[in-house]
Each structure stands twice: as structure tokens, then as C-alpha cells.
Image (tube, rainbow, N blue to C red):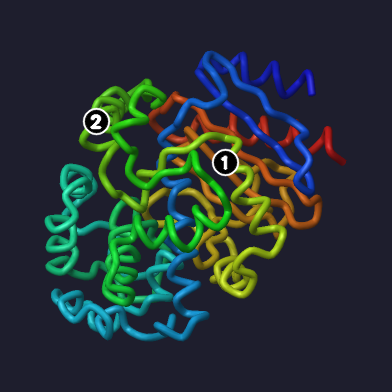
Amino acid sequence: MIEVDGLVRARGARASLCVLRDGRVLIDHSCGGPPDGLFWIFSASKPFAALLVHRLAVAGLLELDAPVARYWPEFAGGGKDAVTIRHVLAHRSGFATARGFALDALAMSDWPRAVRAIERATLRWRPGEVAAYQPIVYGHILGELVRRVTGAPVAAVLRSEVLGPLELSDTHLGLPDRLWGRHVPIHGHGFGGPLTARMVNRRSVRRAVIPAAGISTTARDLARFYQALLDGFSGEAVTEARRPSGDAVLDRTIGTRIRWAHGFQLGGVGRPMGSLSGRETFGHNGSNCCIAWADPHRRLAFAYLTDRIVAGHSAAAHLGEVADAVLKSCD
């Protein structure tokens, strides 16, 4: 694993990498800090909210092909009455933001404000027509659905349904004040990077419930989450979340080719999961700063968290290099 260690250190960031195979630790490496540092994982958070929605569907509490407005009537505002839950899960809802990325980011830590903005949002495309990644509203839509169906806040449902049963005690949707001393600050580079870092380093943001981006966790806990999915936790729900929504497409928001499932990104298209990743690999990138995935064929669970965010997609190449180095060493 010398090559992997060198790649991580050469990045010049605080980082934590954990790789499991059938529950056995292959790599548990931290650079620049202790292994129990709690990283903000950006969009690598999204599969947690998606998994909750799929679990509710399996339990018969909602239908994936039903309009979101069936469970949340106010969502129909702005002509969104035909948007289904499945559209949202696959990033084909017809709108990527509620009021633009910057305004969505400013409102993301205020749940009622963010929900009202989504209710008033209008469509840019016909639902189901194009893939257009929803950076922030994705989590609030799914989280509000969870609240409407269960009557409980999404963070509480996540704790009772997933984090608690899997004993993921270092994973938090909204960082508790008592754990502030363990949080890992983000360092931003390039155009927009420092501004992003200043925003997400605020205590008010880290403690907020932001399902699309706001999970704080360790690499060890995140790898254990994916290992649990490989081992059959929420089997039917995970099968549906992994189901491809189509072939690789040029996502209208991100501007790169992605294979979307219904809650996960899929491998087989190169970076950031690596050029050696299989088509069955499923996981999620987090702003090219953090990433986690599972490879069912190789029985690998991979979590790589860093404190470095860089504008553009250049950092995706680094994530892919680390993934390929791990895959080479495991084949």
C-alpha cells in the first residue's frame, strides 16, 4: 500500500482513508491529524437520505413513482405537480436549484426557509427529461418527504433507522456541540474555494441538518456504512437505490459524464471512482473533496475524506488515482 500512502501524502491535505474487504481492514490511514477527526463530507452525504426514502418505500409508506406532491401538497407550486420521488432520486426532477446555487447555500441551514424556497421553485426542464444534479435541494426534498411520511425530523429518523442499528456512533447529520472539538475545518483553494470553506466552517452550518451535504463522519464509520450495505443491510432498499436510471450522461449541472442510479453514483466511467472501477460499484462523490463507494465484485468498502476543496474538477483526478491504486493492490 506504499503507492496509496504516497498519493495521499502528496496531496498536502489532512486526510483519512479506510478500506475494508469483507469487514477486514486493509487500509486505515490518517494524514495530518488523528483518525477520529470528523470530516464534513459534502455530497457524499446524499446516499443516507436516499436510503431512508427507499426504506419507506419498501415498508409501503410511499411510492417512488408517485408525485412528491401526494405527500407534500405545497411542493406542487411552480408547476411541479408531475415531479415524482423517482425523478428526484435520479436527479431528473426538472430543476437543479430552488433560487440558484448561491441562494440555496445561504438558506440550507434554515429548514423552513429552504423548504419554502423549494415549494416556490419552478421547472427548467420537463420532469424526467434530463439529468441535472441537485446539489442542495435534493436533501431537503427527500428529508421533508421523510418528515411528512413519518412525522419525525429526518435526522432523528436517520439515527433510529440506520446509524443506531449499524452502531455508527461517529456519523452525524448535524454535528452535536459536544463534538465541535473534533471537527475538521475545510481549506478552500482556487476560485470560490475559500468562500465555500468559510461558509461550511461556520459552527451554525456544521450543526445544521443539511441532508444533501451536511453529514460529519470519520473514514472508518463511512467505510463501515458501505460494508453494511454490501453485507445486506436494507437489502431491497439498496437494490432499488443502486438501480441505474440510464446510461452515462452529461449531467447538465456538473458538466461531466455520470452514471446515476436512484441515490448513488455508479462506477465504470473513470474518475472519481477510478478507471478500474466496475459498473456495479456504487457510492457518491463529495465536491471532489471526499468520496466513498462499495465494490460488490471485489467486496471492497472505500472511504477517503480530505479537508481540501478545489474549484473545478481537477481534484477528481486525484480521487481516481487513489481509487485505482487501491484497486490495483487488491486485484
The amino acid at mark 1 is Asp
Residue for point 54% across, 71% down: 245
Q: Please provide percent x and percent y for residue 316.
A: 54, 35
Q: Which quadrant holds the N terminus? A: top right
- Residue ID for mark 1: 221
Q: Earlier in the sequence, mark 1 or mark 2?
A: 2
What's the residue at 68%, 28% (across, down)? 28
8 above or below 318?
Answer: above
The local secondary structure at tag 1 comes to helix
Residue at mark 1 to residue at mark 2: CA–CA distance: 22 Å
Camera-side residue of 220 and 42? 220
Circles 1 and 2 in contact, beta carbons < 8 Å: no
Q: Between residue 114 and residue 320, name the one nearer to us.
A: 114
Is 291 above or below relative to 147?
A: above
> Is 169 left, or right, of 183 in this rendering?
right
Of residue 103 and residue 141, the one placed in the foreground of this image is 141
Compared across the picture, whether 281 is left or right of 83 comes to right
- Residue 240 position, x and y percent, is 57, 73
Numbered mark located on residue 286 in the image:
none
Across and down, in percent, residue 224 comes to 63, 46
**In the image, is residue 283 above or below residue 217?**
below
For the C terminus, the quadrant is top right
**Image quadrant in which you'd find residue 63:** bottom left
- Is 106 left or right of 254, judged from the image as shown? left
Asked which quadrant contains residue 78, the reply is bottom left
Question: What residue is drawn where x is 50% and y is 72%?
Answer: 55
Percent x, y of residue 16: 58, 26
Residue type at tag 2: Arg
Image side of residue 59 versus residue 117, left or right? right
Label 2 sits on residue: 203
Q: What residue is shown at x 44% (from left), y 54% (from top)?
A: 46
Circle 2 packing at 10 Å, graded few (<14), some (14-19), many (20+), is some
